[in-house]
């Protein structure tokens, strides 16, 4: 008994620390609060969730059995099925799930204050996001690494399966467009940023040739060279911006859009070793390194959060960054870091083929997602250490802030915050930019916050410009890697679909097929990117909610599959583990879709927006922020397309859940013996460095 | 060597493992075990094969 108490004492201490930190966040008086409270509230919550909830899911709900051989052991072929050390696999899995998403969503959601986003990031990951990742990883592992789409088809049925496939393809397109939009918004009119990013192309090609032909497999030495060249590219960007070449490296959003579209097409058609693979290495090293550095710097400097706990926009839904109130839009805007359907694509497929022991799904599935959530917490801290007035001047669309620091200052005052024109001008000059106004998309805000945090520790104001562009480079680099990789994934999906109709089109090395499929996928995201860049209303606030809805739609697919499998396993008692997050996710996504489709407020509802602009156009009026009849027409087209997409997404969710409900009903009423598609039990002979084995032999189903 | 260097060495080992730097050594060992007597790929062939394999069956990543 005393022993038992001793074992739990440390957890009681952690719980108390966590509770105090949460209390400070929610209740402390005073204007501002230290970021340390937020940091430690999240860490304590993660620790408790990992120790107790994840363990409960591992042992009771999934009944992980370490005497059961995993596919990595049974099918070990030294290639795709390989038992991989859990720490290494954790690193790979984390690098695969953590992209730019957790850095963008929380920054945008900061317009409602730091508290709503923080609560959702931490509670969401513990009860929904990490649960989704872990259960899908486990179920895919039990099925020899089947993909989410295959599981949806086999466990639910052809309708659910087809809906899942459409969901994956459409989220991919919106995702790529939104990410590319973030890059365009960060690089437009910025010679420094554009030059540095452009330099990553020759650097990547150099690395690619080196790794392919000169010294194959010597990854670390060439990555070190690559990172050094990258830093040089950032520094030389500063020289360019002050030289006579600055003009030549200054591009408008539209020009950058075309550059990205051409680049995306080439990257999809060119051999991977030339561009994609080396870039992947570079961006992974940059990503892990920068995130670690950010965590350490925040923990050491403990900056103060300037953003209030909540802003009026949380309740009135009139925020300039995105429209709509706290429920449901915070839960849509912050997907990655709290609950991200995208992860279920990674958790099924590659990672499950590499796991040594079943119980490791806790560390790899749940643990990696907690780590991503921590990245999201750091992103929200980074956005909230900025002065709120500055935050809104950077994040409100151009139609709101205008072109001058004076107009921006008064626009921010109109929003109920304050920032002087001098500060806006000074901030821009400190980071070596022409202007920081209306630099929407999250990346510039993140970079401003990061430059402020880093320069407090390294180099002071003199280094702020370097750190700003370091952050821009870091974010743009791995967004572009995602654009490369995502375009390729989309291309393969289109080829796969086409191959069902006509064989040769399915061959991934057949050049005409490659070109056509690449053009289709690039054309699709390129369209939304172009529309976003030229949208008079500001593309991010129109497209980002759609992206969030699409991502949460995929999460609904994953959680539906998880719930179905739990029921088939006879786990009715524990079905709430996936069913509750599913219910929440469906409520959020459907409410958001409903508002996007039916709201009478033109700021929120796409069709209301369409009608307002159409009526005005018919009367020969021009509605702000549009400035001409052509722009009015543009708004009308965009809101129609976006509205139709909202309908499509909502319909997909309803179809999948309804189809699954049919299966659930059948199982519960015993109409049919549920068909389990698990691979049969086989004894594990694999030895993992003397760790305690979990649930040995608990569930043989020979 | 001495104790103080141990964390550095294990970090270095982790880095080599996670970056794929020692993937070839692992492949060779597995190949000898599973296909004894058959010729194995050389280092260059292995990494070229591995790279193509990885990107021809792409998973995806989180936004």
Image: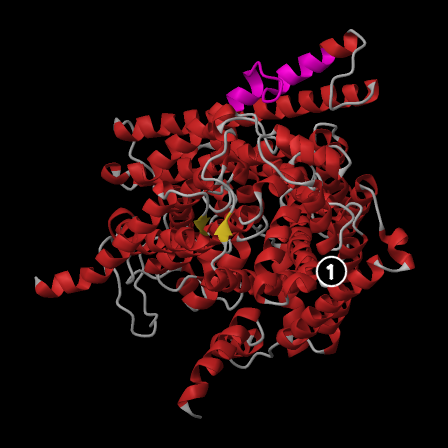
Between residue A509 and residue B18, name the one nearer to us: B18
For residue A585, what is the image quadrant?
A: top left
* In the image, residue A535 above or below residue B47: above
Magenta residues, as a range?
A593-614
Q: Residue at x 42, y 44 (%)?
A: A129
User: In the displayed image of the protein, which residue is found farthest to the left?
Assistant: A1
Image position, residue A24 (x, y; %) = 35, 47
| Magenta span dominant secondary structure | helix
Q: Residue at x 70, y 33 (%)?
A: A401
Q: Which residue is mark 1?
A: A275
For residue A220, what is the image quadrant?
A: bottom right
Q: Residue at x 54, y 75 (%)?
A: B16
Image position, residue A101 (x, y; %) = 57, 46
- State the SS at label 1: loop
* Residue A570 is at least partly visible in this image: no
Using the image, name the chain to which the residue with label 1 belongs: A
Number of marks present in the image shown:
1
Pointer 1: residues within 10 angstroms few (<14), some, or many (20+)?
many
Q: Is residue A127 magenta?
A: no
User: In the displayed image of the protein, which residue is found farthest to the top?
Assistant: A619
Q: Is residue A601 magenta?
A: yes
Image position, residue A241 (x, y; %) = 83, 57
Q: Is residue A404 left or right of residue A481?
A: right
Image position, residue A384 (x, y; %) = 53, 46
Q: Is residue A567 left or right of residue A587?
A: left
* Residue A548 is at least partly visible in this image: yes
User: In the displayed image of the protein, which residue is found farthest to the right?
Assistant: A244
Between residue B56 and residue A308, name the one nearer to us: A308
Q: Residue at x 30, y 50 (%)?
A: A20
Between residue A27 and residue A375, name the one nearer to us: A27
């Amino acid at each position: 008994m005393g022993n038992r108490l001793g074992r739990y004492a440390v957890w009681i201490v952690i719980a108390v620390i966590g509770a105090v930190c949460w209390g400070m966040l929610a209740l402390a008086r005073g204007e501002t609060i230290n970021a340390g409270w937020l940091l430690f509230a999240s860490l304590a919550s993660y620790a408790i969730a990992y120790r107790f909830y994840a363990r409960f899911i591992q042992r009771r709900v999934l009944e992980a059995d370490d005497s059961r051989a995993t596919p990595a052991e049974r099918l070990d072929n030294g290639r795709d099925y390989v038992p991989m050390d859990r720490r290494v696999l954790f690193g790979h899995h984390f690098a695969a799930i953590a992209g730019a998403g957790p850095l963008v969503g929380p920054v945008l959601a900061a317009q409602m204050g730091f508290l709503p986003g923080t609560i959702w990031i931490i509670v969401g990951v513990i009860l929904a996001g990490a649960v989704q990742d872990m259960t899908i990883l486990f179920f895919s592992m039990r099925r020899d690494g089947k993909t989410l789409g295959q599981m949806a088809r086999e466990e639910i049925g052809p309708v659910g399966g087809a809906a899942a496939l459409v969901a994956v393809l459409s989220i991919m397109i919106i995702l790529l467009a939104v990410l590319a939009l973030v890059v365009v918004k960060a690089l437009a009119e910025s010679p420094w940023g554009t030059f540095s990013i452009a330099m990553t192309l020759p650097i990547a090609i150099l690395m690619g040739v080196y790794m392919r032909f000169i010294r194959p497999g010597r990854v670390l030495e060439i990555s070190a060279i690559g990172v050094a060249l990258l830093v040089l590219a950032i520094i030389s960007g500063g020289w360019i911006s002050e030289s006579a070449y600055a003009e030549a490296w200054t591009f408008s959003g539209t020009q950058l859009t075309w550059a990205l579209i051409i680049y995306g097409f080439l990257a999809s058609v060119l051999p991977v070793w030339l561009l994609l693979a080396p870039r992947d290495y570079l961006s992974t090293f940059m990503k892990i390194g920068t995130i670690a550095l950010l965590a350490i710097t925040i923990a050491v400097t403990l900056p103060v959060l300037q953003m209030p706990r909540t802003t009026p926009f949380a309740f009135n839904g009139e925020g300039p960054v995105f429209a709509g109130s706290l429920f449901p839009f915070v839960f849509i805007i912050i997907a990655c870091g709290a609950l991200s359907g995208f992860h279920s694509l990674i958790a099924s497929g590659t990672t499950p083929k590499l796991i040594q022991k079943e119980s490791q799904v806790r560390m790899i599935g749940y643990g990696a997602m907690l780590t991503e959530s921590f990245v999201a917490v750091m992103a929200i801290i980074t956005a909230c250490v900025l002065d709120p007035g500055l935050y809104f001047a950077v994040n409100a669309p151009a139609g709101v802030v205008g072109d001058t620091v004076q107009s921006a200052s008064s626009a921010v005052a109109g929003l109920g915050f304050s920032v002087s024109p001098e500060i806006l001008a000074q901030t821009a000059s400190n980071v070596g930019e022409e202007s920081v106004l209306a630099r929407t998309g999250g990346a510039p805000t993140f970079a401003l916050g990061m430059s402020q945090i880093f320069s407090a520790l390294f180099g002071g104001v003199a280094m702020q410009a370097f750190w700003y562009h370091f952050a821009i480079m870091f974010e743009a680099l791995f967004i572009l890697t995602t654009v490369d990789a995502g375009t390729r994934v989309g291309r393969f999906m289109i080829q796969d679909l086409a191959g069902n109709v006509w064989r040769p089109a399915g061959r991934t090395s057949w050049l005409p097929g490659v070109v056509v499929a690449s053009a289709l996928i690039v054309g699709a995201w390129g369209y939304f990117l172009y529309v976003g860049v030229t949208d008079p209303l500001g593309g991010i606030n129109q497209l980002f909610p759609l992206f969030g809805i699409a991502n949460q739609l995929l999460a609904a697919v994953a959680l539906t599959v998880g719930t179905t499998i739990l029921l088939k396993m006879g786990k009715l008692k524990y079905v709430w583990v996936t069913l509750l997050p599913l219910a929440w996710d469906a409520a959020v996504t459907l409410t958001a879709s409903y508002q996007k489709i039916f709201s009478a407020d033109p700021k929120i509802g796409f069709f209301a927006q369409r009608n307002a602009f159409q009526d005005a156009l018919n009367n020969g009026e021009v509605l702000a922020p549009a400035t001409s009849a052509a722009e009015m027409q543009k708004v009308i087209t965009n809101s129609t397309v976006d509205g139709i997409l909202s309908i499509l997404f909502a319909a997909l969710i309803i179809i999948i859940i309804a189809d699954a409900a049919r299966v659930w009903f059948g199982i519960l009423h015993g109409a049919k013996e549920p068909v389990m598609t698990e691979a049969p039990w086989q004894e594990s002979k694999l030895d993992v460095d003397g760790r305690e084995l979990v649930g040995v032999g608990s569930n043989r189903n020979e | 060597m001495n104790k103080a260097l141990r964390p550095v060495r294990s970090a270095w080992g982790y880095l080599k493992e996670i970056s794929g730097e020692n993937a070839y050594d692992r492949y060779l060992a597995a190949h000898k075990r599973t296909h004894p007597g058959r010729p194995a790929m050389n280092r260059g062939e292995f990494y070229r094969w591995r790279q193509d394999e990885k990107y021809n069956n792409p998973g995806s990543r989180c936004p």
